[in-house]
Amino acid sequence: MTMVSVTGGHTLPIPPSPMDYASTASVKQIHGALAAHHHRHMWIITGPAGCGKSTVAQYVAKELSIPYIEGDDYHSDSNKQKMSQGSPLTDIDRWDWLITLREAAVARLSPSKRSANKRHDGVVVTCSALKRKYRDVIRIAAYNDHDVMVHFIYLRADADVLLARVTGRKGHYMKSAMVRSQMEALEEPDATEQGRDVLEVDCGASLTQVQQEAVRTVREVLADDQ
Ligand SMILES: Nc1ncnc2c1ncn2[C@@H]1O[C@H](COP(=O)(O)OP(=O)(O)O)[C@@H](O)[C@H]1O
Ligand SMILES: O=C(O)[C@H](O)[C@@H](O)[C@H](O)[C@H](O)COP(=O)(O)O
């Protein structure tokens, strides 16, 4: 454990962060080491507006027969109003949303919410999770319950692709003028995160290809957790 010096020359241990806890090894190593254990999985479909989170998440949830939670449904009215007026959310606007969304996802996994006949061993969640600290808020679900594994599926696309998709989408509060601020806020998962719990899917391909690639990626992880 990392130690930190404090006044008087003492050292105190720094508790591991959710990120440290999530893994110090690769995703494959963790899954291999825990192969005998069946986890409950949170699949967080991430990326900026227009990357295809909702469209892909619905498909993954249907293919896996697990619940789907739409992150946009968990914003406060004031957040929605702000976004619809073209103002990007701040960190402060996002904290409660992220925590509420995480807890909603955990609730869908909890034993009390499982039906008598069918065990919900997974949940799919859409959440832009643009910054690493936002992903860390979600990672706390695995930190709190060792039985839960959090995986991020990052849908990567260039700004011009996102702009075209948001422009073409009707009836959503997030308009195309917001794409720029989304890209400015975005902290793409680096190699460290990708080696731990982030799986990247190129979402510039056709919708069918992206959906199938996302499901293939999920099934590969699940195959290691049998
Ligand atoms: N791979 C894709 N190719 C073409 N269009 C897509 C693709 N993925 C999503 N779309 C379309 O782009 C728009 C934005 O997708 P959506 O799922 O709402 O993104 P997000 O939830 O990330 O904002 C929708 O109209 C959707 O049908
Ligand atoms: O479908 C979309 O266009 C996005 O999901 C959009 O609704 C927004 O990105 C998030 O809900 C939260 O906002 P932030 O991305 O600013 O955190």
Image: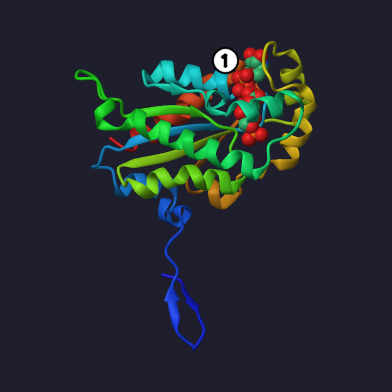
Using residue 68 as the reference point, say whether residue 93 is left or right of it.
right
Dot 1 crowding, Cα within 10 Å, few <14, some 14–19, many 20+ = few
Tell which of 43 and 211 is nearer to you. Answer: 43
Residue 211, position in %: x, y? 53, 20
Q: Residue at x 42, y 31 (%)?
A: 104
Residue 16, position in %: x, y? 43, 61
Q: Is residue 63 above or below residue 194?
A: above
| Quadrant field for ligand 1 | top right
Q: Residue at x 44, y 27 (%)?
A: 124
Snapshot quadrant of residue 63: top left
Q: Is residue 206 visible?
A: no
Residue 46, position in %: x, y? 57, 33
Snapshot quadrant of residue 226: top left
Q: Residue at x 67, y 16 (%)?
A: 172
Using residue 114 as the reference point, say whether residue 68 is left or right of it.
right
Tell which of 94 and 116 is nearer to you. Answer: 94
The residue lying furthest to the left in this view is 116
Q: Residue at x 28, y 26 (%)?
A: 113
Quadrant location of the N terminus? bottom left
The residue under label 1 is which amino acid type?
Thr
